[in-house]
Image: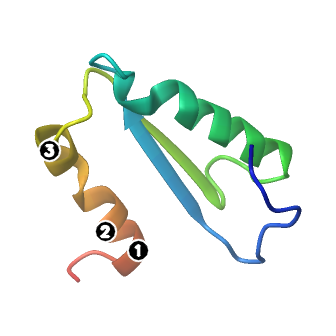
């Protein structure tokens, strides 16, 4: 459960997970966090981005395949 009553103005959140492996890369927990944020008024595609990488596991190879996405989101292309 999220512990704060208010989310900071301008806060942007990007969450992702895979779906493979014993932990399914935390998919169920990621969906619960997404749903709590939606319940607090954030909208998908606006300040909240949620990505699911089907078949990706919780390991370095899977993270390496998608690490560029949050970096570009934070710092812009070509940074």
Which residue, given by chain and number where applicable, does mark 3 sit on? Answer: 60
- The residue furthest bottom is 79
Whole-Å distance between the Cαs marked 2 and 3?
Answer: 16 Å
Name the spot of residue 47 as percent of width and height, x first: 65, 61
Against 77, is 47 above or below? above
Which residue, given by chain and number where applicable, does mark 2 sit on? Answer: 71
Position of the N terminus by quadrant: top right
Mark 3 Cα shell of 10 Å, populated few (<14), some (14-19), many (≥20): few
Name the spot of residue 28 as percent of width and height, x first: 54, 25
Q: How is the image coloured?
A: rainbow
Name the spot of residue 19 as percent of width and height, x first: 36, 22
Say whether residue 74 is left or right of residue 59. Answer: right
Position of the C terminus by quadrant: bottom left
Which numbered disc, 3 or 1, marks the residue that appears first in the sequence? Answer: 3
Q: Are the two marked residues, 1 and 2, in contact with CB atoms closer than 8 angstroms?
A: yes
Which residue is located at x 66 percent, y 46 percent? 44
Which residue is located at x 61 percent, y 67 percent? 12
To which quarter of the image does residue 34 belong?
top right
Which residue is located at x 54 percent, y 36 percent? 30
- The residue furthest left is 61
Residue 53 can be seen in this image: no
Count the numbered circles shown: 3
Which residue, given by chain and number where applicable, does mark 1 sit on? Answer: 74
Name the spot of residue 39 as percent of width and height, x first: 84, 42
Residue 26 can be seen in this image: yes
Mark 1 Cα shell of 10 Å, populated few (<14), some (14-19), many (≥20): few
Say whether residue 36 is left or right of residue 60. Answer: right
Secondary structure found at label 1 = helix
Secondary structure found at label 2 = helix
Whole-Å distance between the Cαs marked 3 and 1?
Answer: 20 Å
Give the number of the mark in front: 2 or 3: 3
Against 40, is 4 above or below? below
């Amino acid at each position: 459960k999220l512990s704060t009553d208010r989310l900071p103005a301008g806060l942007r959140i990007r969450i992702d997970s895979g779906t493979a492996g014993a932990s399914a890369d935390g998919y169920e927990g990621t969906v619960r966090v997404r749903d709590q944020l939606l319940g607090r008024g954030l909208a998908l595609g606006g300040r909240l981005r949620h990505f699911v990488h089907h078949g990706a596991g919780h390991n370095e190879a899977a993270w390496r395949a998608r690490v560029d996405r949050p970096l570009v989101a934070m710092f812009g292309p070509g940074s």
